[in-house]
Image (cartoon, grey):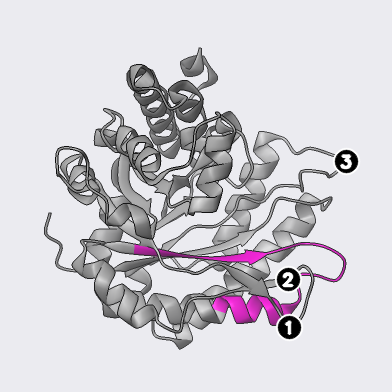
Amino acid sequence: MNFSSLSEIAKYIVADGKGILAADESNPTCKKRFDSISVESTEENRRDYRELLFTSEGMKKNIGGVILFDETIRQHSDSGKSLVEIIVERGALPGIKVDKGLQPFNGSEIETLTQGLDDLDERCAEYAALGAKFTKWRAVISIGQNIPSQECIDANMEALASYAKTAQKHGMVPIVEPEVLINGEHSIEDCYDATSRSIKSLFDYLDSYDVDISGTILKPNMVTPGLDHVHTATVEEVAQATVKCLKENVPAELPGIAFLSGGQTEIESTEHLNMMNKIGGFPWKLSFSYGRALQASALSAWLGKKENISAAQDAFSHRAEMNKLASLGKWSQSLEE
């Protein structure tokens, strides 16, 4: 697949209802997931699990990009073929997580700043040579008493802009991920405020760093109440609040928005995305960049056993197809039965 511009790459990833498989879990996160199914988190097991996802039938028409971890972009299957090659053969583009995790912001016990800018130029050059067509960087914003502070938001969004400029310099599309965490007792209004402030700051910094917005993808949270809030929100309330927030803050030239699932269940993630696309009336593609919401059923079906690979692939393929339909506003609960 040859592309003449960053814009073409970005549009390809979210074309025709396709979305992104987030398979960039760090080894410690992978260990937690594998512990839940009593499977040892070895390099070989991590490779085998990801290979079963990448070779699934559901990759072909539903997934436009796969975010990889540093270990995974270097791995090969038993046949000797690189996992990057396997992804490309399925019609998806390989991408890479490039941030280096979180550190406390200004001594805070809650607020954080994402690390990884120091050697980013060198790492982007290497990842581009390894076949990556896009990159991802995650900023984390928490809601609590008197937070998020504007200083923390701005520091994280400026780092995202600096990262995005570096990724584009090396011919890779940056996925910018300002995640407002779902953890907490906050209301949907609190989430709206924090999400709006974060996205506004992000695009202000992207503009000041002269980042090509047409060659960028936004990966935001949906606007929801905190997991511990006394009231839950309806599907319609989440969809309407999220679309309103995005329309107020995201420029029209952005090709696509690929949501993170962020603690939602598989069905909730699909249902909310579908409702947003039913509402419509926005200039960008609204799609998905899910990790657990694409993988949870597949992981439970696999259990680390070769004889379960087919069942795990079927589970993943089903979720990939359901989310593609949601990206087109064509999903319904009856398709899950």
Residue at position x 66%, y 35% in the image: 235
**SS category of the residue bearing label 1:** loop
Label 2 and label 3: CA atoms lie apart by: 24 Å
**What amino acid does circle 2 point to?**
Glu
**Among the two numbered marks 2 and 3 on one chain, the one whose residue lies closer to the N terminus:** 2
Could you tell me residue 15's position as x and y percent?
Answer: 29, 47
Residue interval drawn in magenta = 135-157
Where is residue 239, by image quadrant? top right
Judge whether 259 appears above or below 202 on screen: above
Query: Residue 230 bears which disc, if any?
Result: 3
Could you tell me residue 110's position as x and y percent?
Answer: 77, 67
Give the residue at mark 1: 106
Q: Residues within 10 Å of mark 3 (few under 14, many from 20)?
A: few
In the image, residue 210 lies in the stretch drawn in magenta: no
**Among the two numbered marks 2 and 1 on one chain, the one whose residue lies closer to the N terminus:** 1
Is the residue under label 1 in contact with that under label 2 (CB below 8 Å)? yes
Q: Is residue 129 left or right of residue 95?
A: left
